[in-house]
Image (cartoon, coloured by chain):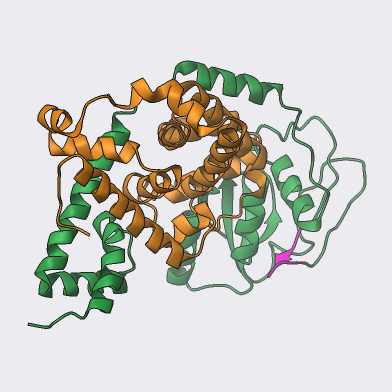
Chain colours: A green, B orange
Amino acid sequence: MTSVNEDDRNDIEELLPWHATGTLSRRDAQRVEAALANDPELARRYELVREELGQNVTLNETLGAPSSRVMDELFARIDAEPARRRAAAGLGVRIGEFLAGLAPRTLAWSAAIAAIAILLQAGFIADIVFKGSGGYQTASVPGAGKGDGAYALIRFQPQASAADIAAFLESNKLTIAGGPTAGGLYRLQIAPAALPKDALAARIKTLQGDKVVGFIGAAN
Amino acid sequence: MQTTSDEVLIGRIAGGDRLAMQVLFARHHMRVYRFLLRLVRREATAEDLVSDVFLDVWRQAGKFEGRSAVSTWMLSIARFKALSALRRKPEEELDEETAATIEDQSDDPETALAKKDKGALLRECMTRLSTEHREIIDLVYYHEKSVEEVAGIVGIPEATVKTRMFYARKKLSELLKERGIDRGWP
């Protein structure tokens, strides 16, 4: 049996509460497990920790709950808050707000919307194209969506925030190549060159897992 | 999994989504309330502070950077609010107001031991720890925060978190001993 020196024991003993709640790193947890297996006194002290844990949970669980007035007052205060101030228009913020503006419902179709082309490549905006005031233009990169490359159709979650969408596009190096359609679909360039069918499916599956994605499917 | 969902909610709250705020409130208000109540020891004060905490969440959601779990962030806000409230009102005064609601405090050790089992005495002793020790015991045991998370919430080095927890537990054993229970540690 391995003898445990006092310094080691003190070091391990300090970790016991976190070992009991399972919040130690794997490495530390293994250290504690090994020490507990070889040191009966430490194991006894660990049982004291577990006893404290159980009673602390019981104590907290019997504290009751706040009254319903808390929620009522909170939301009354929230409703009394001034409308959220628009952030100073940094480039990322403007892109985010643009995307939010195109989200379903908020895209009212009532006003003529200047067309903006967005190219987000590794955090860099390659081009923003404004077209004339006469009518609605899709948000598309000139020439994009027709040439080489792999494309998908995407519909964002209605609740997705502008910041979420901007981050999603940037982190995945995606470009909006067209849209929205009447159904709120956008054409998305997901790779600069055409992808084999399996690779395309895998890429789309990965993107599908993002919180901002409502629907995504391969496009021609 | 829960953390990711909370982060999504915070993103929506940053965009002014009231429904997301309701979901977040429903998910976390109980734990925030209990954390606050253990610190300020007064239900009405804890309730007021819960409202303050979530209003701050509403206002600051856009600044949340995801460097910690949302629950950890909220407990940090709650802690700040609680300590501010305690500074405004001396703890002794709060204790007097709430003494009766914590546990009966009039029994001598023998009577208390006769009346209660060891678990009940342990819980009573937990209510008698200092604010600093109550806080760390709750964060570790009930709120299941890691050493790193506690350090972030309390604003102390990780090594201090470990030693403070150790001394909180040691004090707990001493309080138990005063009530007739010797745990053989420390």
Can you give x and y, in whole percent of width and height, for residue B185 in the image? 19, 58
Considering only vertical position in the picture, is A210 above or below B111?
below
Q: Name the residue nearer the viewer: A44 or B48.
A: A44
Q: Residue at x 34, y 68 (%)?
A: A25
Considering the image in quadrants, where does the C terminus of chain A appear?
Answer: bottom right
Can you give x and y, in whole percent of width and height, for residue A70 in the image? 52, 21
Apparent side of residue A151 relative to residue B147 in the rendered image (left or right)? right
Outermost left residue: A1
Q: Name the residue nearer the viewer: B63 or B180.
A: B180
Can you give x and y, in whole percent of width and height, for residue A90 in the image? 81, 55
Can you give x and y, in whole percent of width and height, for residue B94 in the image? 48, 27
Quarter occupied by residue A176: bottom right
Considering only vertical position in the picture, is A56 above or below A77?
below
Q: Name the residue nearer the viewer: A33 or B91.
A: B91
Apparent side of residue B41 relative to residue A176 in the rendered image (left or right)? left
Q: From this viewpoint, is residue A137 visible?
A: yes
Q: Is residue B142 magenta?
A: no
Considering the image in quadrants, where does the N terminus of chain A appear?
Answer: bottom left
Q: Is residue A123 magenta?
A: yes
Magenta stretch in the rendered image: A118-124
Q: Residue at x 55, y 30 (%)?
A: B49
